[in-house]
Image (cartoon, grey):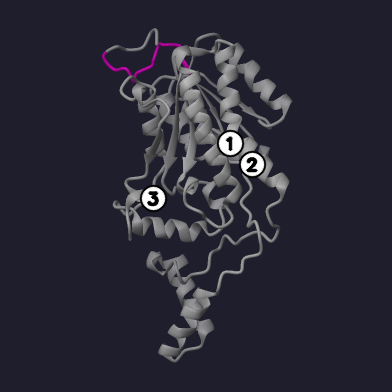
Amino acid sequence: MSGVNEKNPLDFRGSGLWAVVLGGSSGFGLATAKRLARAGLNILIGHKDKEGSVDTVIKPHFDQIRAQGVKLVTHNVNLFDDEGRGEVFESIMTNAGPGKVHLFMQSIAAGSCRLMIEDKTPDFRGQAIKGLADALGLPAEKVKSAINAAFHDKGCDALHTLAESRIPYREELLTQEDFARTIFMMGYDYLLWSRELCKEGLLTKDARVVAMTSEGNEVAWKGYAAVSAAKTALEASCRAMAVELAPYGVSSYIVQAGITDTPAGNAIPNFDLMKAQARLRNPFHRLTTPEDIAELILGLCGPALRWANGAVIRVDGGEAISGL
C-alpha cells in the first residue's frame, strides 16, 4: 500500500488508491463508499437506478463523497449486461489504473424473493387472533386492526407474531429462470469481477475483495430460497478465492450483516416483521446499520484483519447467536 500513512494504516489520503463499489448508491455499498472516502480512498461506484432518483435522492450522497476531497466516478448502468460491465471495467482501468484498486466490494442485491410453491402453512396468526378476540369478547377484525395499528404505528415489536406484514409475498411463484439468474447475480458474479481485476493487474499488491451475505445463508426464510442458494454459492466462491487469489496478495472476505433497514432488505417479504423480531432478539435491541458494516469494511482495508482471509465475518451485535 505505497503512500499509506504508516502511523495510521487506515488513513489513505495522498495514496492515490481506489475502492470500487458495485451497488454503491444505497444501503451497505453507499455507507461503505462514504466511509472509505472519509479515509481518503478515491471511489468508483457502479449502480442501476432510475434517473429521477439519481438526481433527487442519490446525488446529494455523491456530493458528500466528493466533499471529502477525493475523486468520485459513478456509472448508472446495468451491471449484468456486457455493455454495462464493459463500461465500468474500462472506467476502472482509465481512472484508477494498474495496481491502484485496494478494495473491491460487490454489494448488488438483485435476487428474486418469491415463494417456490403455494403456501400451505396453517393460519396460526388467525387462530391466535380469534382466541384473543373470544377472550376479550370483541370482534376478531377489531382485534386484528388494533394489533396492526399498535405494531406498525406504535412500534410494539413484541406483536410481530400477530401483526400482518405490509410486505406481502408476490403472487408469482419462483421460476427456474429466477433461480438461475439470482445465483448468477448474487452467487458468483463477485468471483468473476475479482478475477478480472486481478488478471488485469488493477488490484494493489495486498488488495481486499468483499461481498455481503445474511443469516438467510443458513436459516430458511420463506420466499428467500433463490437468494439463500446464491449466498451459499457466494461463500463457496469466497473460499476458493481465498486460496487461489492469495498468491497474488489478494484477501477475500464475506461480511454477514444482521437485519438492516435498507432498500434491498425491504424488498424481502415479511421484512417488517423480521426487523421487529431482530430488535427483540439482538442483545443491543437495535438493528444493524449500514454504517456498522462500513466501519468493518474500512477495518478490512488495513493490516489488522488481513489474516482473516476467506472468513465469513458476522457483524450483527450478536443477533445470530442470541435467543429470544
**At x 52% / y 69%, what residue is drawn?**
164
Q: Earlier in the sequence, mark 1 or mark 2?
A: 2
Drawn side of residue 213 relative to residue 115, left or right: left
Residue 272 within the segment the image draws in magenta: no
Q: What's the CA distance linking mark 1 and mark 3?
A: 25 Å
Q: Secondary structure at mark 2?
A: helix
Find disc 1 in the rendering and name its residue.
187
- What span is in magenta? 7-18
State whether residue 178 is above or below residue 275: above
Up-down: is 246 above or below 36? above
Q: Report helix, strand or loop for mark 1.
A: helix
Question: How many angstroms separate mark 1 from mark 2 (CA)?
Answer: 7 Å
The three-letter amino acid code for the residue at tag 3 is Leu
Quote the CA–CA distance across marks 3 and 2: 26 Å
Amino acid type, mark 2 = Thr
* Of the image marks 1 and 3, the number of the one nearer the N terminus: 1
Vertical relation: 133 (above or below) 154:
below
Most foreground residue, 32 or 235? 235
> Residue shown at 35%/21% (left/top)?
302
Depth check: give the residue in front, 104 or 16. Answer: 104
Q: Nearer the viewer, residue 14 or 316?
A: 316
Which residue occupies 52% across, 78% down?
Answer: 126
**Foreground disc of the pair 3, 2:** 2
In front of the other: 299 or 186 = 186
Residue 35 visible? The answer is yes
Total tally of numbered discs in the picture:
3
Quickly name the residue at label 2.
Answer: 182
Q: Quadrant of residue 136?
A: bottom left
